[in-house]
Amino acid sequence: MPAGLILVVILLAFCVAGLLNADSTLRKSNAKGDGWRNEIAKTVAAVTDTFQINFFRNTIDDALGKNQGTKIDVEELLRQQAEAESAAAAEAAQKVPELVAPTPAEPMKIWVGGDSITQTFGTSFQRITQSTGIFTPTLDFHVSTGLARPDYYNWPEHLVKDVLPTNPSILVIMFGANDGQNMVDASGKALQRYSEPWMIEYRRRVAATMDLLKAPENNRITIWCGPPPMGPGTKTHGMDQLNYIYWSEAQTRPWIQYFDTWPFFSDTNYVFAANLPNADGVVRGMRQKDNVHLSTVGGDRLSWAVIDRIGKLVDLSAGNVTPPPSQAPPASVVERTEVPPNMPGAE
């Protein structure tokens, strides 16, 4: 055979071998981190994949047991795993957290906090939950606070830094009574209370606070209590509008369970009522003289109503959760299925 023809055959053999081993060459090149050689290897591998030139080599490798996995590298596997975990976490976040049933031997940590209305309510709630034998309660109220004035008291920061690290399984929270005032947004612009920009900014703060309360493992529930209706002549206005924000934002966050206090402190027309009958039929005073804060009777009434709501989410059968009729609301008083943004006669 002429020498020139031999040289051509050798070159063709090298080319065919290069094409058949393109994938292996690319893997070695990637491992070494070669620059221009790596680019050539990528190009050759792309050609062989496009025209299925490596079909015969792969078939032989399969027969010999050399292909024991895919061509996905470790980084790609980690990325896919992270995506799968994120997808699983996102799916879990769309479900109401499932909490382990508390028992006297292993009581559940429950935290209650908020503004000054929570002072009386929280005191009742702490006492009553303690009496059930299955809760370890913590009360944390701060007078004249809310979400409107983080410069005065920063609730989101307090929750993240001081409350959540204690790992309560359930949070019971109430804001609103002090938030009907002008605010300053992040740019320093003053916002007139209940104006459209004010409502947008307040909704943003509520949504952000709710998101902060989500547990990564989806193992915490927050009962977000809307403030009750305020009596005539008070300076506390717009609770119905704030309740609409709380309720509507909670609809897309299963870890936030909005509790509608309004029906428990109003008449059958949802108008403020200072005196109401409990389950025993006796009419009692539910509010203090200012028609804003709850009385001890009102705090007990709300506490049993919230515990009943928690019992629909968590198995509380191991505890003493049957309320005395003199403290609990009548069975006919229930939360509304929808919370409107404006209530007739609301302060």
Image: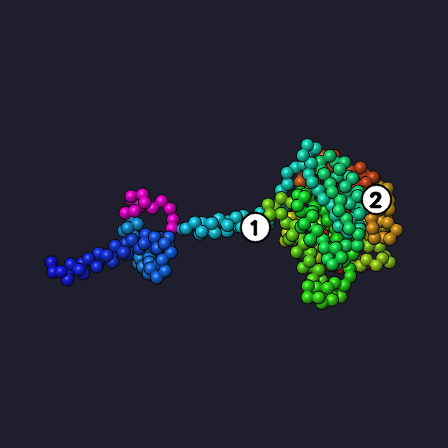
Residue tagged 2? 296
Element type at marker 1?
helix
What is the span of residues highlighted in magenta in the rendered image?
Answer: 60-71
Residue tagged 1? 90
* 338 drawn magenta: no
Q: Name the foreground residue: 11 vs 272.
A: 11
- Sequence-wise, the earlier of marks 1 and 2 is 1
Q: Residue at x 75, y 50 (%)?
A: 114
- Binning the other alpha carbons within 10 Å of mark 1 as few (below 14), some (14 to 19) or many (20 upward) gives few
Residue 142 percent across, percent down from the top left: 77, 51
Residue 133 percent across, percent down from the top left: 73, 34
Tell me: 275 left or right of 335. right
Q: Tag 2: residue type?
A: Thr
Q: Residue at x 74, y 66 (%)?
A: 191
Q: What is the number of callouts on the image?
A: 2
Element type at marker 2?
helix
Q: Residue at x 70, y 57 (%)?
A: 245
Q: Which quadrant would the C terminus be assigned to in this image?
A: bottom right
Q: Residue at x 28, y 47 (%)?
A: 60
Residue 139 percent across, percent down from the top left: 75, 44
Q: Name the foreground residue: 269 vs 230.
A: 230
Residue 25, can we see it? yes
Residue 99 percent across, percent down from the top left: 64, 41
